[in-house]
């Protein structure tokens, strides 16, 4: 049995306006289009996870809701985890390690630089930086989520809006 993680960086967000906290920054029109494009790409490849977990920041949860809608999932089914906003590898790994064993796949919607660093950590790849709404799909040949540690994943797909040649 194996596990699969889809790491998604949120779509392009509006610049921080005076008086608008970083947490409250919304997607701009480009970010909405990016999220739609990537959600449809994964749907067409039949790469739809069962569980969706998102940072509660507006731009991340908005991205997750767009994906959920295209994947025919209820927006209320998205789990919010405060640990994803302003996170680190240890906190993101804890989210994976604590998933129910019955779950086989997960999409995690987060932020850079942490989401890119997490993909590198899990796979020993060097993505450097996921572009906005970039997606890294990682497979793990493990039976339990708590068996996932540094370097145990294999990159199945690295894709981003506008990319012609995804890995």
Image (cartoon, helix red, strand yellow):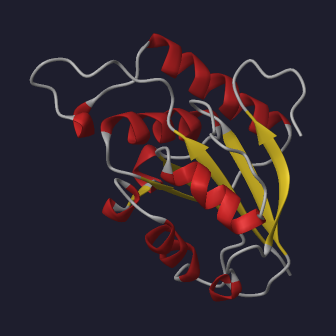
Which residue is the extreme one toward the top? 29
Q: Is residue 117 left or right of residue 61?
A: right
Q: Is residue 158 above or below residue 97?
A: above
x, y percent for residue 116: 60, 49
Which image quarter holds the C terminus?
top right
Query: Looking at the image, which residue is at 75% across and 51% down?
Result: 126
x, y percent for residue 21: 17, 34
x, y percent for residue 166: 86, 33
Q: Closer to the camera, 52 or 138?
A: 138
Q: Is residue 94 visible?
A: yes
Query: Looking at the image, which residue is at 69% across and 76% down?
Result: 150
Q: Is residue 139 left or right of residue 7?
A: right
Q: Is residue 58 above or below residue 110?
A: above
Which residue is the extreme one toward the left? 19
* Snapshot quadrant of residue 28: top left
Q: Is residue 68 left or right of residue 80?
A: right
Q: Is residue 105 visible?
A: no
């Amino acid at each position: 049995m194996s596990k699969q993680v889809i790491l998604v960086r949120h779509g392009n967000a509006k610049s921080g306006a005076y008086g608008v906290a970083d947490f409250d920054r919304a997607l701009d029109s480009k970010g909405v289009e990016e999220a739609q494009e990537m959600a449809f790409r994964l749907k067409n490849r039949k790469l739809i996870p069962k569980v969706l977990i998102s940072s509660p920041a507006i731009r991340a949860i908005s991205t997750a809701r767009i994906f959920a809608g295209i994947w025919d999932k209820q927006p209320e089914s998205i789990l919010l985890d405060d640990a994803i906003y302003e996170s680190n590898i240890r906190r993101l790994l804890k989210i994976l390690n604590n998933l129910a064993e019955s779950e086989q796949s997960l999409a995690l919607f987060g932020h850079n630089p942490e989401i890119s660093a997490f993909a590198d950590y899990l796979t020993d790849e060097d993505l450097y930086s996921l572009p906005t709404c970039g997606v890294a799909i990682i497979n793990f040949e493990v039976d339990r989520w708590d068996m996932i540690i540094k370097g145990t994943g294999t990159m199945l797909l690295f894709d981003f809006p506008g990319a012609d040649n995804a890995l």
